[in-house]
Amino acid sequence: TGIYHSLIKLGIKHEIPTRPDLNTANFVLSQFPQAHLAEARIAFIDARTNLSVSYGELRRSIYSLASALFHGLEVRKGDVVFVLSPNSTLYSTICLAVLSVGAVLTTANPINTATEIAKQVHDSSAKLAISAPEELHKLVPTGVPTILTSHCSDGNMLSVEELIKGCCTSPELPQVPVAQSDTAAILYSSGTTGVSKGVVLTHANLISIMRLLLWSADVSGSQDDVFLAFIPMFHIYGLVFFGLGLLCVGVTTILMQKYDFQAMLDAIQKHKVNNLPAVPPVILALVKHARKATCDLSSLRRVGSGAAPLSKEVALEFRRMFPWIELRQGYGLTESSGGATFFASDKDAKAHPDSCGKLIPTFCAKVVDIEKGKPLPPHKEGELWFKSPTIMKGYLGNLEATSAAIDSEGWLRTGDLGYIDENGFVYIVERIKELIKHNGYQVAPAELESVLLSHPLIVDAAVIPVEDEETGQIPMAYVVRAAGSELSENQVIQFVAGQVAPYKKVRKVSFIDTIPKSAAGKILRKDLVSQSKYQLVS
Ligand code: 4UW
């Protein structure tokens, strides 16, 4: 039939619950350690301040904040709450309190610009924002009512910290009927084409992905693990692991506000971290610099890699240098709630260093011939399509993009070219969608193109990815200048840098007479990609 099914079956314990009224928050809380002693177990430690939060304290904070949101601030079912904060010990509390009252979570990269943030606040129709004090100035112009995460000495604004302290501990969550089919979160992704769109994830989607994480942690015996989190919780990878899922497993997570190589090594050594979900640039940095750096990585048992392709050479070198560490690749998309493939055993991962694993339980895949639209047999390359209970409901308020992404039978088109071998291992060959990945972060060419076109001396522009060893890819712009203009590469770079978050900056510019386009006016990116390869080597 051309359909690949996950070969792994879940046990009864991990089957997706059908109780219709179960929401993400009470699912996570139902997995928390219940016994008094177990409640003392540490959930989070802030790597910078050393402050820790136990599972018991976390539960009480979630109850208090949920009460304050519901009774004090009148946050109601369906209200969208915009969270703008780096990783912090409060992040999970905020997410779970918001979800528990049936409100909808939307998250953003705190380094986004005020304009980028205003767009998302507007697109998601946010009713309330919760912001780290240092990012507040970006929310003020939007006019959305905002509370701070933590108290800030020079103001009299309400903060989450005070709401938690000030609210008499509530013995339970406010009772808000929430259906699993209700929206839980709106995360932003550009999908296969165009600008960032709101990926609508339901409680059923999030509960399903957490069940799978719980299952895989049970299989690998991760209950007593110490994880390190520099992957941000605003992104699906960090949200599913650190914000929500690992709390179901009961692990301790050391939180870093942002990635810093030496700080990461120090934290691993100090806290005897044994599990490190990471991204390819970090694996490369470990291979290149860990030997020279003063550090002890002996506590590490497993390192994960996801969000962008990991080169086979780097993977092999990593295993050679750190033979005691398991290196497991995973692959997923925001649109599939993060999951899609993983390795259940190190033996498999070691034997397939260029694969990103097998389909996770509950997933089905098709490999679809790009020209003929027909499903392909093992080893043949085509676009990967997925079906699973974790697939998004659609893009917020965008039926056209939704039906382009999910077909009438519920198959999600990934925009990734790959193949599956006869044993079910999945290989990603190339990204055929427009999306650029810089250090694992999404950069949408369409967004940079519209910034470029707003320059009075730019007539036309196209943005493509250029491979980069350290960061995966960098955005490169092809620009058509107005007649007679002497606009320089540096001026173009500076113009864009002034308007977008630092990770989205255009880092190379080439001037061209016309942008190659199809008869229908679509930019022929492939032509520009081949041209850039030629230009960069010649
Ligand atoms: N190899 C090649 C990979 C890989 C990859 C992703 O920003 P998004 O929408 O989403 C993510 C999610 C990552 C993720 C990985 C593993 C995991 O367990 C997890 O759990 C929550 C999450 O990055 O970008 C999706 C796009 O990123 C590329 C690919 O193009 C995909 O469509 N990508 N992982 N291992 N490419």
Image (cartoon, helix red, strand yellow):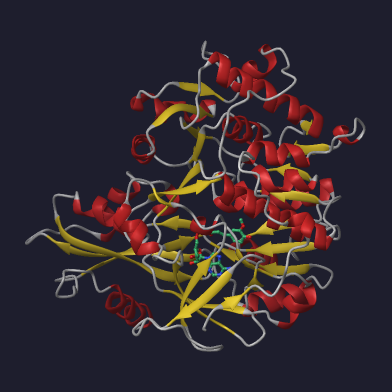
Question: Is 286 left, or right, of 530 in this rendering?
Answer: right
Vertical order, 280 against 103 (above or below) = below
19 or 496: nearer the eye? 19
Q: In percent of the image, x 25 and y 74: which residue is there?
A: 524
Vertical order, 492 against 371 (above or below) = above
185 or 158: nearer the eye? 185
Residue situated furthest right in the rendering? 37
Would residue 231 be visible to someone looking at this image?
no
Q: In percent of the image, x 92 and y 33: which residue is there?
A: 37
> On the image, which quarter does residue 191 sit in?
bottom left
Task: Measuring from the top left, give residue 511's x and y in whole percent.
Answer: 21, 68
Q: In percent of the image, x 41 and y 57: which residue is there?
A: 443
Would residue 202 be visible to someone looking at this image?
yes
Q: Quadrant of ligand 1?
A: bottom right
Vertical order, 238 against 322 (above or below) = above
Question: Is 430 left, or right, of 98 in this rendering?
Answer: left
Task: Measuring from the top left, give residue 434's x and y in whole percent.
Answer: 36, 66
> On the image, which quarter does residue 114 sit in?
top left
Q: In percent of the image, x 54 and y 23: which residue is there?
A: 148
